[in-house]
Amino acid sequence: MKLPGAMLALILLLVVPAASLLADPEDELDQEVARRLMEKGVILPLQRIVEKVEGHILEVELEYEHGHYLYELEILQADGTVVERIFDATTGEPLEKEELESCGC
């Protein structure tokens, strides 16, 4: 059965958004989503978190886990140790710190 173009377009309009609902909501969020969340006041600007960190930031991720927005930062400390620090993106409170690597100096 061949579908007319308008019918195919209608099906795509219904199916494509529904497919996005199947994506894991606990995935890393992109910068566009982060910008919108920040503009709405849901999360703090990343700069507010960076001000609390000593060392060189290697990587930053914004994630949504267990109903909370989290900033996860990988930081190279002065002693050569790489740590991961997790902050609540809504309040800025530090939640966790984990050593990832050591320089072995």
Image (cartoon, rainbow, N blue to C red):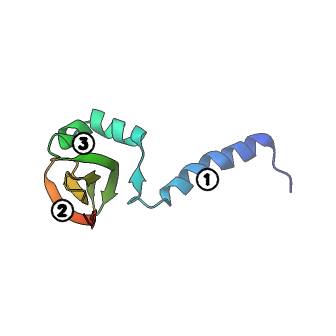
Instruction: Indicate the position of residue 92 as horizontal and vertical percent values.
Output: 16, 47
**Residue bearing mark 1:** 15
Q: How far apart are marks 1 and 3 (CA)?
A: 29 Å
The secondary element bearing badge 1 is classed as helix
Residue 15 appears left or right of 2: left
**Residue bearing mark 3:** 42
First of labels 1, 3 by sequence position: 1
Mark 1 closeness class: few <14, some 14–19, many ≥20 residues within 10 Å? few
From what the image shows, is residue 102 above or below residue 28? below
The nearer-to-camera label among 2 and 3 is 2
Depth check, front residue: 1 or 20: 20
The nearer-to-camera label among 1 and 2 is 2
Q: Which residue is painted at 21% across and 42% down in the image?
A: 50
The secondary element bearing badge 3 is classed as loop
Depth check, front residue: 81 or 41: 81
Q: Which amino acid does label 1 sit on?
A: Val
The nearer-to-camera label among 1 and 3 is 3
The secondary element bearing badge 2 is classed as strand
Q: Which amino acid does label 2 sit on?
A: Glu
Q: Which amino acid does label 3 sit on?
A: Val
Mark 3 closeness class: few <14, some 14–19, many ≥20 residues within 10 Å? some
Q: Are marks 1 and 2 in contact (CB under 8 Å)?
A: no
Instruction: Indicate the position of residue 46 as horizontal and vertical percent values.
Output: 25, 40
Depth check, front residue: 40 or 5: 40
* Most distant residue in the right direction: 1
- Visible in this render: residue 45? no
In which quadrant is the C terminus drawn? bottom left
**Residue bearing mark 2:** 96
First of labels 2, 3 by sequence position: 3
Q: How far apart are marks 2 and 3 (CA)?
A: 21 Å
